[in-house]
């Protein structure tokens, strides 16, 4: 698919009241969605790769809220060491590694970030109690994006 056609489709969606649009051509799937704060495009090669944001014109609503909240001195953010997909459990039918309110110690596995089909266990770098889980299960995360807010012991 021609990049100019993709750009035209993005402009059409931005200027209309349509909030989501997707089209598939061969093994290439394009999904364009927007909300009041963000327009994003996901390109997906079916069946080999997971969809990833290709264009993001403004920071997402979730990131804006996270950066706007001041972190108290006894609170610690556990951040993603890599870009990938965030999973709270080792498999879809398994229980989550941690829940809000759980006490954790340094080295406790908190989640998995999948990158290039490799499952990377993310461990806590401090002891404390989980105050917030800042990312939804199955969503893409960026390098250094806050994942958990922990109240340190």
Image: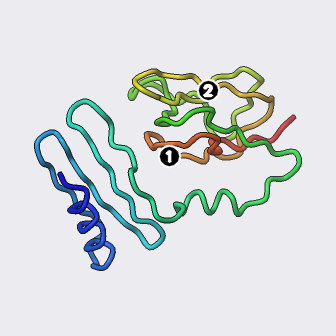
* Mark closest to the chain's N terminus, 1 or 2: 2
The reply to whether callout 1 and callout 2 are in contact (CB within 8 Å) is no
Q: Nearer the viewer, residue 79 or 133?
A: 79
Q: Position of residue 66 (x, y in %)?
A: 65, 57
The front one of 94 and 134 is: 134
Residue appearing at x 55%, y 43% in the figure:
142
Residue bearing mark 2: 122
In this view, the residue farthest toward the left is 26
Disc 1 element? loop
Rendered residue at 40%/50% (across/down)? 53
Residue 43 appears left or right of 1 = right
Q: Report the mark closest to the observer, 1 or 2.
A: 2
Residue 77 lies, in percent from the top left, at 73, 43
- Residue under the point 42% across and 24% down: 91
Structure colour scheme: rainbow
Could you say where residue 93 lies in the image, as x and y percent from the top left? Answer: 39, 26
Residue 8 in the image: x percent, y percent?
24, 68
Residue holding disc 1: 136
Classify 21 as above or below 128: below
Neighbor class of circle 2 (other Cα within 10 Å; few <14, some 14-19, many 20+) is: many
Tell me how far mark 1 sits from mark 2, CA to CA.
15 Å
């Amino acid at each position: 698919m021609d990049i100019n056609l993709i750009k035209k489709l993005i402009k059409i969606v931005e200027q209309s009241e349509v909030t989501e649009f997707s089209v598939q051509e061969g093994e290439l799937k394009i999904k364009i969605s927007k909300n009041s704060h963000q327009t994003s495009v996901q390109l997906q090669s079916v069946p080999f790769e997971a969809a990833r944001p290709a264009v993001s014109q403004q920071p997402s609503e979730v990131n804006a809220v996270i950066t706007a909240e001041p972190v108290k001195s006894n609170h610690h953010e556990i951040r993603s060491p890599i870009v990938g997909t965030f999973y709270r459990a080792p498999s879809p039918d398994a229980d989550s590694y941690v829940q809000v309110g759980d006490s954790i110690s340094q080295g406790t596995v908190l989640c998995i970030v999948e990158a290039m089909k490799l499952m990377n266990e993310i461990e806590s770098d401090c002891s404390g109690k989980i105050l917030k889980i800042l990312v939804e299960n199955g969503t893409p995360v960026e390098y250094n994006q806050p994942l958990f807010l922990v109240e340190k012991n």
